[in-house]
Amino acid sequence: MKIGYPCVNESLDCTSGATFRLASYSDERVELAVAANLQCLQRILEYNVTNGLRFFRIGSSIVPFGSHPINTFPWQTRFAAEFQAIGDYVKAQQMRISFHPDQFVVLNSPSTDIVQRSIAELVYQGSMLDLMGLDSTAKLQIHVGGLYGDRDLAISRFIATYQELPEAVRRRLVIENDDRLFSLRDCLRVHEAVGIPILFDNFHHECLNHGEPMAEALRLAAGTWHPERDGVLMMDYSSQQLGERKGKHTSTLEEDLFREFLTHLHGLDVDIMLEIKDKEASACRAVSVLRELQLVAAETTALS
DNA sequence: CTCCGTCAAGGTTAG
DNA sequence: CTAACCTTGACGGAG
């Protein structure tokens, strides 16, 4: 079991997502930003290893405008060595990496322009994993997309687009159940059609489900991951922020709820991404909880 | 230096 | 039909 957090480390004084405005685009700024972002990414990964955090979601803007036509800078070749060095470190430390392209990536949109831009973004993010030399257990997670007033049609459009994706994207792509539109059950329909793994989000499942108990939902999602090709089930973990609208993520890990959730695993191996406001602070507390329960190793290699 | 409006991109829902 | 929301940081012009 690996524990992680998304994109941003609040303890370090650097960001791996430095960017700039489209209006001030230049190749030179891309080069400077990518160099700084990769350097920071390496520092974040080292921090993670020191703290027993072996799962990390890299932010989408390592390369500013990475899939925008304005960006013709050959960053893939210019930074090939840097990406490879990071990938070597990830592999040496047995870490797991993912990306989560944001809301603008919608594969089931009725607009061919939006679909094409979405595919370009997936190609860009997937190519970073390729440059790192990571296998297909490193994933790109997205949601099924929009509803457009017809769930069946929306799902069939996703399936049709998925089947046309470049193999480099398809081998990494996974879908996540969301909290309002496409439930675990909907994702299972997509899985049955094309075999895509389902990244399980416990909090979204609490917000939107069809009565499947948590343990059953975990079992169903885990069954969509092919062990050799995909690795163990990836999941996002969060809980409700009390007093806020339904779906609002908690600001810090509620340890009692986390312990309660863990009882539903029944020995299932999962890699857990904590989608919680205070980032690595909560992730470190989750690691402590798991060590008490002896679900992760007690020692961290970097402290030797 | 600090403040704050604004930033590539989509879609849903409330009003 | 239009505006707010999601979610969030940080860019960069203004003062």
Image (cartoon, coloured by chain):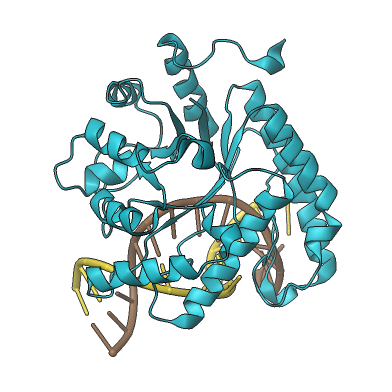
Chain colours: A cyan, B yellow, C brown
Give the image quarter of residue B8: bottom right
Residue visible at 77% across and 73% down? A72
Locate the C terminus of chain A and report the quarter of the image it occupies: top right
| Left or right: A196 as drawn, with respect to A214 | right
Residue A80 appears left or right of A172: right
Q: As displayed, is residue A265 above or below residue A68?
A: above
> Residue A32 at what x, y percent from top left?
82, 58
Identify which residue is drawn at 18% across, 40% down: A212
Look at the picture and state if A38 lies above or below A121: above
Q: Nearer the viewer, residue A296 or A22?
A: A296
- Residue A10 seen in this snapshot: no
Q: Is residue A124 above or below residue B15?
A: above
Q: Number of labelled discs?
A: 0
Q: Residue at x 64, y 28 (%)?
A: A94
User: Residue A302: percent from the left, percent from the top?
Assistant: 70, 17
User: In the rendering, at what x and y percent does residue A124 appear?
Assistant: 64, 62
Residue A13 image offset from top left, x and y in percent: 70, 38
Direction from residue C1 to residue A57 in the image, left or right? right
Name the residue located 43 percent from the left edge and 10 percent from the top edge.
A292
Q: Is residue A138 visible?
A: yes
Image quarter for residue A122?
A: bottom right
Give the residue furthest to the left.
A211
In this rendering, the answer to whether A76 lies above or below A199 is below
